[in-house]
Image (tube, rainbow, N blue to C red):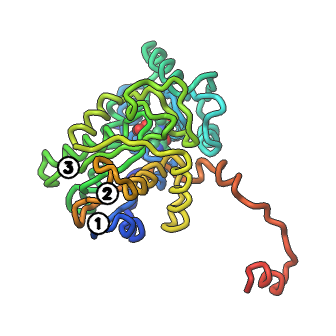
Amino acid sequence: MPIISLGEGNTPLIYSPRLSERVGHACEVFVKNEGVNPTGSFKDRGMTVDVSKAVERGTTALICASTGNTSASAAAYAARAGISCVVILPAGKIATGKLLQAFAYGAKIVAIDGNFDDALRIVRELGETGHFTIVNSINPDRIAGQKTAAFEVVDELGDAPDFHLLPVGNAGNITAYWVGYREYLAHETSTKLPAMIGFQAMGAAPIFHGRIIENPETIASAIRIGNPASWKQARAAIVESRGAIDIVSDEEILTAQKWLAQNEGIFVEPASAASIAGLFKWCDSADSARSFQKIREASRIVCTVTGHGLKDPDVILGRMTELKPIAASVMDVRRAIEL
Ligand code: F0G
């Protein structure tokens, strides 16, 4: 079988003393940083498997709908495989860095007047023509690749964590982690399963509300999804793991993004910060069903951060103050840094 790989996976699981302190109760918090994959997001784990399998079957063209990261990843792996790639995107809703990646890798890009859910509907239909392999997470090979993140967590910690927090959009990733954790338990590589806790953006929270959201809205464009493809599987993961689905506001997301960059040196895109925003929310919450205030002593918590901050610079750009040059002298620089 041909293996189409760019060296994805084996991402760092970073112990975070400050987040651990925030939770208290002698708990340990780890950040699984998926932003350091080849195209800057967790999508590469699934893409290496589904593009390899597609090439094995003789596929010459890929197609996907995307909020940005899937299209960047698909475009890169198609380039590596020497096949073509069509990406269908909601016009004006893709973060700058991700769109730039699709261009750079040479994908055929189509922007539609519609949202991600419209784009996925079109992709499903075009997939039926037999011209393309769909590389969205409705393709089971994507899930098979993404479950390896759960394997890595267990390999590194020596067992599954007690809680796993992650952002939820189309719900493929929470589905994949749950498959991975269950497989390791079945093979007796681990002795337990974590509670899976998914966070959706407040304005794009169909699973939380239990209904399709027609016009999802959030600053976290990667998870601006109103009708997730893996809705059922995500619900099953949450129920079976005795986990939860919760929501975080855009303000909470941006605060967490800034906090993680400035306190841990990990710069993630807004959607990724939903897991950290969720952790903070559960630290502060008095609602016993959604709170870490009475968490078991020495619990281990893993938060997945899904994509690199450089992909989505717009919010930070807006916050940057204009840099006025000063004279090139030590004296002027000393004054500027108040030394
Ligand atoms: N975080 C980021 C950075 C994402 O790009 C996505 C999904 C998610 C979280 C949510 O993961 O969909 O498996 O629940 N992005 C898809 C895309 C939809 O098209 O790039 P999920």
Left or right of 62 on screen, residue 28: left
Q: Secondary structure at mark 1?
A: loop
Give the image location of residue 208, x and y in percent. 38, 35
User: Is 80 or 328 nearer to us in this picture?
Assistant: 328
Q: Is mark 3 within 8 Å of ligand 1?
A: no
User: Is 284 or 91 nearer to us in this picture?
Assistant: 284
Q: Nearer the viewer, mark 2 or mark 3?
A: 2
Specify the amino acid type for callout 1.
Cys
Left or right of 6 on screen, residue 139: left
Q: Residue furthest front?
A: 286
Check the image and report above or below for 15 versus 83.
below
Which residue carries the number 2 mark? 292
Labels 1 and 3 touching (C-beta < 8 A): no
Which residue carries the number 1 mark? 27
- Residue depicted at x 78% and y 78%: 336
Give the image location of residue 36, x and y in percent. 47, 55
Check the image and report above or below for 179 versus 110.
below
Which residue carries the number 3 mark? 193
Which quadrant of the rendered structure holds the N terminus? top left
Can residue 219 be seen in the rendering of this structure? Answer: yes
